[in-house]
Image: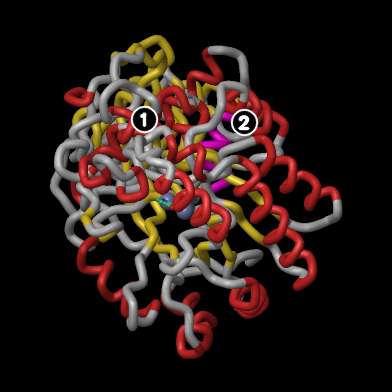
Amino acid sequence: MDLVVKNGTIVTASDTYQADIGVQDERIVQIGQGLDAGGAARVIDARGKYVIPGGIDPHSHLDTPSMGTYMSDDYLTGTIAAACGGTTSIINFCFQEKGKSIHDSLEHYHPRAKGRAVVDYGFHGMISDYNDAVAREITSLPEAGVTSIKLFMAYRGALMVDDRTLVQTLDQASRAGILVMVHAENGDAADLMQQRLMAEGKRDPKYHAVSRPPRVEAEATGRAAALAEVVGVPIYFVHVSCEEAVEEIRRARVRGVRAMGETCTHYLYFTEDDLDRPGFEGAKWVYTPPARKAHQPPALWHALANGDLILVASDHCSFNFKGQKELGLGDFTKIPNGAPGIEERLMGVYQGVVEGKIGLNRWVDLVSTTAAKTFGLYPRKGTIAVGSDADLVIWDPNAELKVTQSALHQNVDYTLYEGRTFRGVPQIVTLRGQVIVENRQHVGPPGTGRFLARTRWGA
Ligand code: DUC
Ligand code: ZN
Ligand code: ZN
């Protein structure tokens, strides 16, 4: 055997039990009590620890241009941070440049990831310049291993698509086994509010939240869900930030629509008050949809516990405070939208277990299993079973980490969680049986990650 993990408590989305795990040729080949570790190349003693399937982050942005600047994490730094946080697979958005096809964007991103990423990676298509040619090429994406695509209902005059484009894409994509992901905010309303606030001299980061209140998100969520219902197809809502949007998803589901929503770690922790931190510091919390009022994080935890929301992604989208967030000094509409969080995600959601908001198995479901099932990776990823890839996290439930920017691995000059202590820390991480993190440090060369060709929705 290449690796035996002994004495740990295996936690999957459905079960918690004590057993050893045997790994050979990148896969789990045995699970049982008292496995013979004799002759194994490596033995990990996981006594007193949880052994969970590697985290799957289905929403990250690396090495991508945005709002006149460039994200600070590339496929090396971003995936090292992911690995150190217990994530062994990511699905990254491939930005479609104006005048280029979606296949062009895949060709652009493949060499950026290959030889650099240290965890496995897949790609989402992303439509930012819709035209007939793009419409025609959508159906061929699964042949390239890409079975999901994102559309924007926000960012009027830039990325926003109209309802015609949305219904057309929903129709075409779903017939090809592609899941449509939607950034649901009413772009016209947000645009008008931005203009009004700027004209009134309201230019500070805190007005980011004022310009796109919950109803802006809920309106688009309800509309997109209704259009998915009319077309008779599933729909996936990225970065759900508020109970009003959750309510629209729930209503759609009650009507029989296959509407799915993710939230992101930062929506579980931060509020509009963070956008109003002294000086310009609030710019660190400018992500879209924005941080909400204080009653929203508990409502989102509740939605995760009861199944109204199906998973937690990072929406990792890192810009340095110095020189990048500062582009929006004096004009909140120019602050690059996004925040880092790829490393903090598993620990951030685990605090819900520590605090009794969710159970241990639900945690695994939220950070790994459901993403694998939703995005065509299960059961190769997202569980601990014979035949699955040996992506394992040895999780110490008693260790604590005081989060500081310097204690993390992402290439950005801040963390939203500075000074917080997380209980429950990933200690050792394996990718297909190879140890890539030990004592919270990345070990091994760049390029251990492989492209994940994903199966079609519903396959
Ligand atoms: N949407 C994202 O998913 N990430 C960054 C900004 C945005 O609008
Ligand atoms: Zn978005
Ligand atoms: Zn995003």
Which amino acid is tagged 2?
A: Leu
SS majority, magenta: helix
Residue 175 seen in this snapshot? no
Indicate which disc residue 383 carries: none
Residue 391 location (% of width, % of height):
39, 42
Of the pair 188 and 349, the residue shown nearer to us: 188
Q: Quadrant of residue 125?
A: bottom left
Residue 226 vertical placement versus 440 (above, below): below
> Which residue is at a point 21% across and 36% down the rendered structure image?
321
Secondary structure found at label 2: helix
Q: Amino acid at mark 1?
A: Glu
**Which of pointers 1 and 2 indicates the residue nearer the eye?**
2
Q: Write down the region rendered in magenta.
A: 362-371
Q: Note whether 240 is above or below 111 in the view shown.
A: above
Q: Secondary structure at mark 1?
A: loop
| Image quadrant where one finds the N terminus | top left
Query: Which quadrant: the C terminus?
Result: bottom right
- Residue at left 39%, top 36%? 392
First of labels 1, 2 by sequence position = 2
Q: Give the left or right position of residue 397, taking residue 237 as reference.
A: left
Residue 101, quarter of picture:
bottom left
Residue at the spot of label 1: 344
Left or right: where 347 falls relative to 372: left
The structure residue drawn at horizontal position 58% and vertical position 41%, both measured from the top left corner, is: 213
Is residue 67 visible in the rendered image? The answer is yes
Q: Which residue is mark 2?
A: 300
